[in-house]
Structure formats: C-alpha cells, structure tokens
Amino acid sequence: MTAAASHRPSLDEIATAGFRATTETDEIARRIKDAIGAGANYVPARLAIGRSLALPDRPAPAKGEPGRIIKGENLFGTGADLATWVSLIIEHAGEAPPDLRAFQALVSAHWVRGMRLLAELYDASNGDAFEFKRSLAEAALPEGPAKPMDGASPAPAAEGAPVALVIPVGEVAQDAATGEPVAWALNAPGGSPHAAFMGAVGSGKTRTAAAMLRAIRARVPVPILAFDFKGDMSDANNRLDQAFAATVIEPPRTPVPLDVLALSDRSRTGIALAAQRLRDSLATLRGSAFGPVQKGLLGDAAERALGAHAPCRLGDVLAALRAIYADQGRKEDGATASLADLCRFALFDPQLRPEAFFARSWIIRLTSDLPDLVKVSIVTLMTDALDRHLNSLADAATDADGNRALRVLCVIDEAHRILGVKLPGLSGLIRLSRSKGGAVMLISQGPDDFDGVEDDFLNEMGLVVAFRTNADPKAVRRILGPGANLALLERGEAWVKLAGEPAARKVLAWR
C-alpha cells in the first residue's frame, strides 16, 4: 500500500466527519424539504447528491459561504447505505480521493450542483408540490432504451398503441370436439380483459396462463405486475421475467421500491378519502384485530400521517395511531400490535412514484416463510396503489374498431390465498379498470375459491379456464353450466367459458 493510499478515509471516518455545502444551497434545500414534506435535512441533500451523480461529468468545486454541517452518518446512513454512497461517489470520480478533505470537497461539489438542478425542477413546477415530485421522478428515469437482462426483450418505454389482441387459449388452443382453434379477444369492444384460471396442482393452469401472457407481450409492450406465491412464474418453464424484462423482488428481503401510499390529490378531501381507503384495506385483513372503534382511530391516524408525510410510510401511520392512543389514554391493543407486526418488516422503500413504478414490469415473490398477514398486506397495498394510479389517468386509447390499449397486466397466482379477504384495490381493478387499460388475471385452485367472495369476480371475467379438480358440482354448474365436469377432464384439457358465448366448451389447452 502506498503512502497516499494509507491516508484515504475509512468508512468510520466518513461516518463521523462533517459535510457541508453552501448557504445558498441550504436555502434551496429548505424549500425542497417543505415541498416534499421531508422531516430531516439530509433528505434533500441526498436527493441533490443523487441527482448530480446521474450526470456523467464531474461537478465544479463548490463556491460560496459554507453552509450548515451534516454528519456523514446522517447524510449517507451507516453500514451498507454508507458504503453504497461512498462507492457511487468514488466510481463517478474515477478514482478514490487521496484524503478525507478531498472526499468532503467532492461531496460538496455534487451537493451544490444537484441542489441547483432540483431548484430548476421546483421553479418549473411553479411551487406545486405534486408537479415537482412528478418531475423529480421522471428525472430519475434512465434515458434511452432499457438494456435487456439475460436475453430478455427490452422493457417498453411508453404506452403502446391499441391493437386487436386475439390470444390463443393455451399452447394448443383447440376445441376438443371439433378441433377448431379457440382464441380470446382480450381487448375487443364490449368485452372484459380479465381472466380466471383454475385447477388442481399440476393441471396446467399456471402453464396455460403464462403461455397466454407471453403471447400478449409478444404483441404489445405492456408491463406486468405479478404476485407469485409459488416462485414458479420466473422459472425455466414459465419465463415471465424474461418475456416481460421484469424485475423479481422478494420482500422484505428486498423491499418493493414503490411509494405505495402516494397520493395524486393532496387536497384535504383527497387525503381524507385516501385515509378511509387505507383504513378499510388494513382493518379488514384477517387477524388484524381492528374492531369498530380501532377502525375509526386507524382512519384518523392514516389521515394525520398522509397529511404530514410525503412519502408516507406504514411506520408513519403506526406512529400517528400510537399518538392518538396516548392522547386518549388508551392502552395499546391487538390493533396496534397488528400494525406494528407489519412495520417490523421493510416491505416498501418509496423510491418510485406509482407512474414510474407501474410503467415497468415486476414479479413479487411472496415466499412460504412469510406470515399470511404480511403477504396479503403486500397484495392489498399494491393493488390499492395500482387502482388509484389507473383511476388518475385518462381513459386508454382505442383504435377504429374499438380495441382498447393495455397499460398494465396484474396477475395473482395462487389467488385463493387472498380471495377470502376484501381487497378494495382488487375489486376496483376488476370492476373499473377496463376503460383505463387495466387487465387482471387470477390463477387459483378451483371454482370453490370464488364461493363466498363478497365481490362476484367471475361475473366480471372475459375468460374462465377450468382444468381438472374435485370442485363442488354446484360451484362448477354456476360458473360453467350443467354440462361441465371438471373431475373427468383429461391431461391438458379444460372447460373454457368466453364472455358472449352461450355455453362453455371443452378445449385442449396443452399436450
């Protein structure tokens, strides 16, 4: 090791050192902090440094009166966070600074340049907080086409034009009686873009759904949001991660990088409505222990947290709920314990606003070792966020024949795990998202899973595909008609009900 290298700062030295920009930068940071609702001074500083690091050229040295000091452990965090920031700064510079003072100067240069860039975005938004945050999210997106991973197709850069999507029902897609091809006009006028697949383990329901999803993606650059309870949607057989250039995430090992509680309307009414919806979503989860009184207090806490924090986290809602309990002299109970259990895990990291997050493809793996409350909460909050996002958009475009463009595919494998729970977001997506370009695909074990569900989802499906299973005959007749018998189906066969057709028919989906 050279003499110069021996003076390079360690991570511990960086963590305890003081960093500062300029007084001009501090004044800009104050405005940015107010605009985004941040509670700490390091938040706008991190945004500024990150924004500067996105530019390829090296920043000019900081000039001006020195500003307030922020310790390294506050500015960059500790542990892996600190190491990541330091690595990014050194990688951008192309070499390690020779000493701590040189590293501090480099940080100050990025800090000053980045804050000026943030000021430009803020001024262009005319002080509108939502518009500023939208511009900030767009500025963080990479320029140019996304690079494919492992031979995958590039992720779509923009919403595709409307085209007729007539998708074969499975790999073979033949009527078992006539041999004629069987296809589903997914986005045709007057129909529904939603589908349900059901069948016993090994019957081919996921295989068929994946084949149809790949066929859709081959026609249009639509992103996917898939909830994978078995871990097979990205395996060698189904390959949905490759087909959609999807990022595979396993929360809480890797938090979902979505600002899941983001609001497009931060008016008092908008915040109150969002708080009521969050209250309903969390309070109806199995085992959540929210009675009528606790449910009302949860709504008050959600409204308080959403109004005070942007981004707002579940931990902010928990803190607000505990404060309300303390104000009323209430002891903590099962309701606060349930919310605290969720907050033990870093399920979400609000890096991306919904418009940026849902423009990309994601497979969310919900492994068997996760508590059911955590898995269902992830699905609940993310479908809520997707429903709110789609409802904030104008109707999706249609072509001359009335075929509507798709904006996103939401897929839930092993859907029986969540069908017994009232999910406002999923209900909204199935009932109302068609005009917005949304499509939902539910993959479950059988018709019985839909019995007792408060929302009759199957009535909203444009396609129902049922493979072999020992389902209740009454449920089968209700869904597919009197002639269907799922117990007698052969390998690869399914009963298929297409919206608009008078009766279900037996189809060879795969062989």
Image: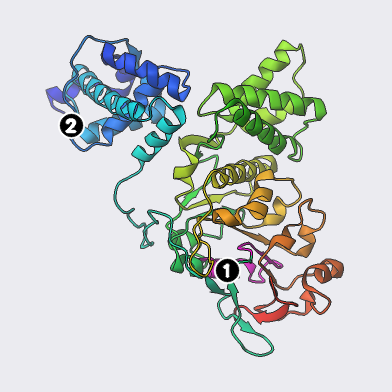
Near-viewer residue (395 or 220):
395
Badge nearest the viewer, 2 or 1: 1
Q: Which quarter of the rendering shows the N terminus?
A: top left
111 to 289, vertically: above or below: above
Q: Secondary structure at mark 2?
A: loop
Q: Where residue 249 appears, x then y in whole percent?
A: 50, 47
10 Å crowding of disc 2: few (<14), some (14-19), many (20+): some
Residues at marks 2 and 1, CA–CA distance in whole angstroms? 52 Å
Please tell me which residue lies in front, 45 or 202: 45
- Side (left or right) of 433 relative to 198: left
Amino acid type at image mark 2: Arg
Q: Is residue 74 visible?
A: no
Point out residue 274 in the picture as x, y percentages from the top left corner: 63, 33
Give the colour scheme of this rendering: rainbow
Residue at the spot of label 2:
58
User: Label 1 near label 2: C-beta < 8 Å?
Assistant: no
For this rendering, which residue is in front, 447 or 262? 262
Q: Is residue 422 magenta?
A: no
Q: In the rendered image, which residue does mark 1 sit on?
A: 188
Write the residue at 83% across / 66% down: 475
Q: Position of residue 353 (x, y in %)?
A: 47, 38
Q: Which residues are magenta?
A: 192-213
**Callout 1, which amino acid?**
Ala
Residue nearest the viewer, comparing 306 with 192: 192
Q: Is residue 499 above or below residue 326?
A: below
Residue 56, quarter of the rendered image: top left
Quadrant of residue 201 in the image?
bottom right
Q: Residue at x 60, y 57 (%)?
A: 434
Task: Note whether 293 is above or below 241 in the view shown.
Answer: above
Residue occupying image coordinates x 71% and y 31%: 338
